[in-house]
Amino acid sequence: MTNAYASSGGSAGIASIIPLLMFGIIYGFVLKFIAKRIGKNEWLWFVIGLIPLVNGFAGLWLMCTAFNYIMDKLEYLDKSISRVDSI
């Protein structure tokens, strides 16, 4: 009995990893961009974006963090405007 993986020279294993790497690189750059905008370590988030399965949960957490960052900025602007209106 022959092993199909051994007879193919291992190219099937590498070919199945390439889409994961491509998706991870794209996802890493998206996380890097978001992390830079909210003041987080952008290269750490890029590396986290490369790790399969972890990148999905980390991306969700980073999106929630970005949402909270935006809401804090809006609250600050709202308070600033209300102070100007009261003068």
Image (cartoon, rainbow, N blue to C red):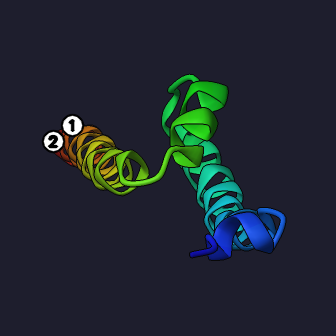
- The crowding category of the residue bearing disc 2, from other C-alpha atoms within 10 Å (few below 14, some 14 to 19, many at least 20), is few
User: Which quarter of the figure has residue 54?
Assistant: top left
Image x and y of residue 49, in percent? 54, 46
x 29%, y 42%: residue: 65
x 62%, y 57%: residue: 24
Viewer-nearest of discs 1 and 2 = 1
In the depicted structure, whether residue 43 falls above or below residue 26: above
Q: Quadrant of the N terminus?
A: bottom right
Q: Are marks 1 and 2 in contact (CB under 8 Å)?
A: yes
x 67%, y 28%: residue: 43
Residue at mark 2: 86
Q: Is residue 36 visible?
A: no
Report the front residue among 29 and 63: 29
SS state under label 1 = helix
SS state under label 2 = helix
Residue at mark 1: 83
- The crowding category of the residue bearing disc 1, from other C-alpha atoms within 10 Å (few below 14, some 14 to 19, many at least 20), is few
Image x and y of residue 32, in percent? 63, 43
